[in-house]
Image (cartoon, helix red, strand yellow):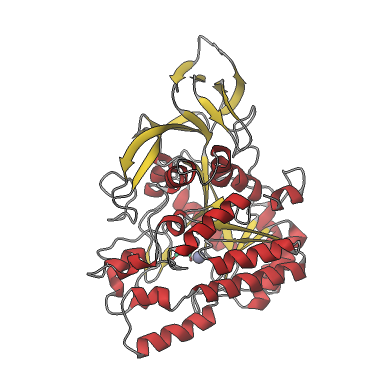
């Protein structure tokens, strides 16, 4: 059915203006003043902002990790995402060395297709590079539309790839039109520091942070950036947490390397002291890279403002405190790494960023949606409000004040790391391709309604690769 959203203030990465939006056949059909159509449902958005649906470029839904499986799957995870104003997620498809890449991709399709309530896509992990992987990559891009490859520089003996693999992945990405993403921490040095801590009987959650200091993130980020320059390729650094890593990215960008980066809400508002909470509660805040000392937060905010970091992901990878995080009681290395973040990503950036004057409203839209669509080959189908774009729309009340709590959140995990945090602003209604997924804060969507998105090659949809690389 057609819809007209009336009286709202449309905000894109470039403009803020009052206009009505006509939605027809899943798309934005018209934007203008005083639109009327007797056959359309009228949605009154007076007093609210109209944002393009948020895009979360970094999720791990129902992912086997740390001896267990992340709690939120494509059902609970995407419902929570929608409540939070996100209408597209890009999830990380893990791969197994020596096994066909397509097997892993098929597994990821199987667990998402009947569950996802919003549109979704996959990145593909590259754990090794050899003739067989080289042969498979073109079809990953052409048939699956997966145009971003993830290389882990940490998690030794689990996901970690060597530098040769990273370099060859960068070369292939350049050749094939894909983007390389890195988890940038020096896994070898971490392994050594972890062993020393355990030998010294240091087993509490705080040692997770102390054995992964900012220097190991800064070093790995700089190394990945240099290899990108050498390969004349393109790099996106996920979950940047600290000054050392921001400096490495800024230095590479100054040299003209195509290096971009993402941070996450948890690094903007929480700090390392949370890992010291008593009664093992610090385990709730164990993820990698770890939370940092408070002074890093302003560096991250500044980098979002100046454009040395471009995007905000959630790194959603949730585990219950009871029954999952407690696998690591007495040994911090056994605490599953990750947290429930997907629902609060957009609201935290709005409240802490826009409301506190750190970024503008248009920068907020760019960081949570538009730049992500451009970076990952989804623009302008996603990431903007313009005629012809998918009608993925968030009607957002900028004035409501509320307190984040596990009691009111929709994620499956038994705690919320932002518990008690006061935020201003909340999505009221959310549409995915023209249909309500959230209406007046209630879920009204359908399981399996989300479409799998094949993405364009890196840089193909924007006027130039330079546009992506620049802020
Ligand atoms: O601790 C985290 N971040 N868990 C998810 C996997 C990853 O490294 O992104
Ligand atoms: Zn990671
Ligand atoms: Zn992650």
Q: Residue 318: x, y in percent?
A: 37, 58
Which residue lies at the image location 45% right of the left edge and 23% below the top edge? 45
Locate residue 56, reporting x and y percent.
51, 49
Q: Nearer the viewer, residue 409 or 173?
A: 409
Front residue of 19/78: it is 19
Residue that extends furthest to the top in the rendered view of this protein = 38
Left or right: 76, with 26 as reference point: left
- Does the image show residue 166? yes
The answer to which image quadrant residue 231 occupies is bottom right
Taking the view exactly as shown, the residue that stands out farthest to the bottom is 199
Residue 188 lies, with reference to residue 393, above or below; the image says below
Q: Could one spot residue 98 in this view of the protein? A: no
Q: How many marks?
A: 0
User: Where is residue 284 drawn, in percent x and y?
Assistant: 32, 63
User: Residue 388 in the image: x percent, y percent?
Assistant: 64, 29
- In this rendered view, identify the residue nearer to me: 59 or 278: 278
Q: Residue furthest left?
A: 279
Q: Is residue 218 above or below residue 396?
A: below
Q: Is residue 38 above or below residue 361?
A: above
């Amino acid at each position: 059915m057609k819809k007209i959203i009336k009286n709202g203030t449309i905000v894109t990465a470039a403009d803020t203006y009052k206009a009505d939006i006509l939605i027809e056949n899943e798309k934005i059909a018209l934007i203008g003043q005083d639109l009327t159509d007797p056959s359309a449902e009228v949605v009154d958005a007076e007093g609210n902002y109209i944002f393009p649906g948020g895009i979360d470029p970094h999720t791990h839904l129902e992912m086997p990790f740390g001896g267990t499986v992340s709690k939120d799957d494509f059902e609970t995870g995407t419902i929570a995402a929608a409540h939070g104003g996100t209408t597209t997620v890009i999830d990380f498809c893990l791969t197994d060395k020596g096994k066909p890449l397509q097997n892993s991709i098929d597994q990821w399709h199987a667990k998402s297709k009947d569950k996802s309530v919003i549109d979704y896509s996959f990145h593909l992990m590259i754990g090794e590079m050899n003739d067989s992987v080289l042969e498979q990559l073109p079809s990953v891009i052409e048939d699956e539309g997966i145009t971003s490859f993830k290389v882990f520089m940490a998690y030794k003996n689990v996901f970690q790839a060597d530098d040769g693999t990273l370099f060859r992945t960068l070369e292939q990405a350049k050749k094939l039109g894909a983007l390389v993403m890195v988890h940038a921490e020096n896994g070898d040095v971490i392994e050594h520091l972890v062993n020393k801590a355990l030998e010294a009987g240091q087993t509490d959650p705080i040692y997770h942070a102390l054995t992964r200091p900012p220097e190991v993130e800064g070093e790995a980020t700089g190394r990945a950036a240099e290899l990108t320059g050498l390969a004349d390729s393109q790099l996106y650094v996920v979950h940047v947490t600290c000054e050392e890593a921001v400096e490495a990215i800024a230095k590479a960008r100054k040299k003209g390397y195509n290096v971009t980066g993402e941070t996450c809400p948890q690094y903007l508002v929480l700090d390392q002291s949370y890992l010291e909470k008593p009664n093992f509660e610090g385990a709730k805040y164990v993820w990698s890279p770890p939370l940092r000392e408070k002074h890093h937060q302003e560096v991250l905010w500044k980098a979002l403002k100046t454009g040395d970091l471009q995007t905000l992901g959630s790194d959603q990878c949730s585990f219950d405190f009871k029954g999952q995080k407690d696998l690591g009681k007495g040994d911090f290395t056994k605490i599953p790494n990750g947290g429930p973040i997907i629902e609060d990503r957009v609201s935290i950036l709005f409240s802490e960023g826009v409301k506190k004057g750190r970024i503008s409203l248009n920068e907020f839209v760019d960081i949570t949606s538009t730049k992500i669509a451009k970076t990952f080959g989804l623009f302008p189908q996603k990431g903007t409000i313009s005629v012809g774009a998918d009608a993925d729309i968030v009607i957002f009340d900028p004035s409501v004040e509320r307190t984040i709590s596990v009691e009111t959140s929709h994620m499956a995990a038994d705690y919320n790391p932002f518990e008690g945090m006061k935020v201003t602003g909340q999505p009221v209604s959310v549409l995915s391709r023209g249909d309500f997924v959230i209406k007046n804060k209630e879920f009204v969507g359908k399981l399996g309604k989300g479409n799998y998105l094949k993405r364009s090659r890196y840089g193909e949809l924007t006027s130039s690769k330079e546009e992506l690389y620049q802020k």
